[in-house]
Image (tube, grey):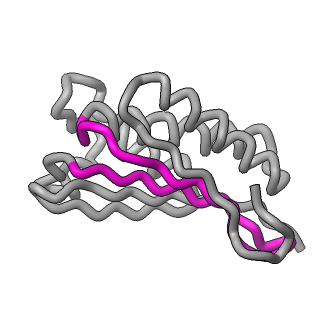
Amino acid sequence: MSGEGGPPREALIPIHEASAVGRVRRVVAAAMAEIGASKIEMTRMVTAASELARNTLTHGGGGEVRVAVVGPGNRRKVEVTFVDQGPGIADVALAMTDGYSTGGGLGLGLSGAKRLCKEFHIRSEPGRGTTVRVASWMERR
């Protein structure tokens, strides 16, 4: 997916149907394998990406995901960015609270994804959609 030290290569995956979630999982797993991630770290990132892809479809009305391996040699990381043009999140802090749900679930989606990733950034504006970027990398010396 990425050249050694070169510009990032990336995959752009549209999310407009449930089958896209499986594709996101496969692409993220391949990217994590490329950077030499452990099985545990790979599972964490794939789980977070799966949850965020489902959120993009269910709450955001669909969108797209960009998966990229970035950085040189021993400093590469996998960045996954989810973008939707849905209704947005009125109160991001509340949405990040464990147990908060607008869909009748357990309310662990966003907060759980945040715990699984080394980086987590969310930007949302009511009426303009939501962007979530997560990242993970391997510590190498």
Q: Nearer the viewer, residue 41 or 52?
A: 52
Q: Nearer the viewer, residue 86 or 106?
A: 86
Residue 122 horizontal/vertical position (percent) = 34, 61
Residue 135: % across, % down: 57, 59
Q: Is residue 136 visible?
A: no
Answer whether residue 94 is visible to the viewer in this image: yes
Whole-percent x, y for residue 49 in the image = 52, 42
Q: Magenta stretch containing residue 29, yes or no?
A: no
Would residue 84 be found to the left or right of residue 34 on screen? Answer: left
Q: Residue at x 72, y 49 (%)?
A: 31
Residue plotted at (39% across, 32% down): 54
Q: Which region is colored magenta?
A: 59-85
85 in relation to 124, above or below: above
How many marks can you see? 0
Q: Quarter of the image holding residue 38?
A: top right
Q: Report the side of 43 relative to 22 (left or right).
A: right
Looking at the rendering, which quadrant does residue 57 occupy?
A: top left
What quarter of the picture does the C terminus occupy? bottom right
- Residue at left offset 80%, top offset 56%: 35
- In the displayed structure, would residue 14 be above or below residue 11? above
Whether residue 97 sits left or right of residue 51 in the image: it is: left
Q: Residue at x 37, y 37 (%)?
A: 109
For the residue pair 49 and 94, the one nearer the viewer reads as 49
Q: In screen coordinates, is 3 left or right of 115? A: right
Q: Quadrant of the N terminus?
A: bottom right
Q: Position of residue 84 (x, y in %)?
A: 30, 50
